[in-house]
Amino acid sequence: MLDLDLIRPVPELLARHAAERGGAMAFRDDRVVRTWVQVHERTGRLAGHLGALGAAGGCVAIVMENRVELAEAYLAVVRAGAVAACLAVQRAYSAIIMAAWRTASTMPA
């Protein structure tokens, strides 16, 4: 049987982890280490900016290398009430270059 008490919204879980595990490491890569409190604060700020831009109910594309800030961006999008679409950096750059090439090749000389 499904225990609905185990299923909690991500923003609620993030706040709980910040309160219960504050100074413990949440994420790390070869450049930075973030605690749960830091992740909660940083994602809250970004979520606020996304909310001010009207992201709630929409989709936000994240184009970033695999690093701590990617996890923070993803959590911030969720906190803002939007859906995150994580795009592979190399593929995203290739798509942008192809779109620019197509646009340039169809422009009158």
Image (cartoon, rainbow, N blue to C red):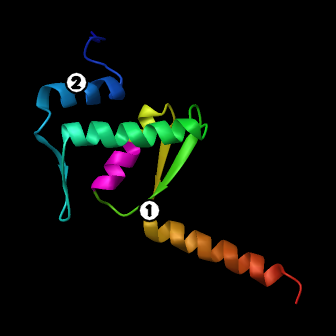
Q: Nearer the viewer, residue 103 or 77?
A: 77
Residue drawn at (52%, 66%), measured in percent from left and top?
Answer: 92
Vertical position of residue 52 compared to residue 62: above or below: above
Badge 2 amino acid: Arg
Q: Which residue is mark 2?
A: 16
Pointer 2 or 1: first along the chain? 2
Which span of residues is magenta-colored? 68-75
Q: Nearer the viewer, residue 17 or 49?
A: 49
Compared across the picture, whether 19 is left or right of 74 comes to: left
Residue 51: which quarter of the image?
A: top right
Q: Nearer the viewer, residue 2 or 12?
A: 12
Pointer 2: residues within 10 angstroms few (<14), some, or many (20+)?
some
Which quadrant is the C terminus positioned in?
bottom right
State the separation of the CA atoms marked 2 and 1. Answer: 30 Å
Residue drawn at (34%, 46%), measured in percent from left and top?
Answer: 72
Vertical position of residue 101 compared to residue 20: above or below: below
Asked if labels 1 and 2 touch by Cβ distance under 8 angstroms, the answer is no
Q: Secondary structure at mark 1?
A: loop
Vertical position of residue 61 compared to residue 107: above or below: above
Image location of residue 6, percent across then percent down: 25, 16
Q: Secondary structure at mark 2?
A: helix
Residue 53: which quarter of the image?
A: top right
Badge 1 amino acid: Ala
Question: Which label number is shown at residue 88?
Answer: 1
